[in-house]
Image: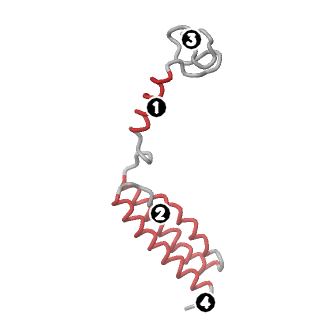
Amino acid sequence: MKCPICGCENPDDYKFCHDCGSPLNFTESIDDLTDELNNLDDFPSLDSKKLIIIGYIIAILFGWGSFILSFFLGSYGFVGFIGLFFPGFMLNSKDSNIRKHAYIQLAIMLSGIIFTVMFLFRWF
């Protein structure tokens, strides 16, 4: 089989050119890739209940844990902002149930961060 890119002769059972590495049957390769892309999900499959539970644990630990840290240690309260990444990741899901819980987790986390900032600046 002759390579359509470089013109090198290849054995018939080769899928790629041994000289330049180009696919020998270009249209078949594109069709295979298109089928694979159509079968992919946006995120790796992870049980949505586990994802939601992990999100609540992170929201409580980072949102309200920062308040506890600032109460005992002083100025470590801004650690809570790190936890905002996980609910932000969950907001990109196509599953409306996961998105709903991500908004709730954001509310939990932001309330803890707001109380932490208020505590650090002695606003209450």
Seen at 53% across and 18% down, the residue is: 24
Seen at 41% across and 40% down, the residue is: 40
Q: Position of residue 46 (x, y in %)?
A: 40, 48
Alpha carbon distance from label 2 to label 1: 32 Å
Q: Secondary structure at mark 4?
A: loop
Residue closer to the observer: 108 or 75: 108
Residue 56 as seen in the image, left or right of residue 74: left
Alpha carbon distance from label 4 to label 2: 28 Å
Residue closer to the observer: 75 or 41: 41
**Sequence-wise first label, 3 or 4:** 3
Q: Which residue is mark 3?
A: 2
Badge 2: how crowded within 10 Å, few (<14), some, or many (20+)?
Answer: many
Q: Which residue is mark 2?
A: 87
Q: Which residue is mark 4?
A: 122
Q: Using the image, tell me which numbered label, if any, was put on residue 33.
A: 1
Q: Amino acid at mark 4?
A: Arg
Q: Nearer the viewer, mark 3 or mark 4?
A: 3
Seen at 55% across and 91% down, the residue is: 124
The reply to whether dot 4 and dot 1 touch (C-beta < 8 Å) is no
Alpha carbon distance from label 2 to label 3: 52 Å
Q: Amino acid at mark 2?
A: Pro
Q: Position of residue 91 (x, y in %)?
A: 44, 61
Residue closer to the observer: 70 or 8: 8
Q: Nearer the viewer, mark 2 or mark 3?
A: 3
Q: Amino acid at mark 1?
A: Leu
**Sequence-wise first label, 4 or 2:** 2
Task: Determine which quarter of the picture holds residue 101.
Answer: bottom left
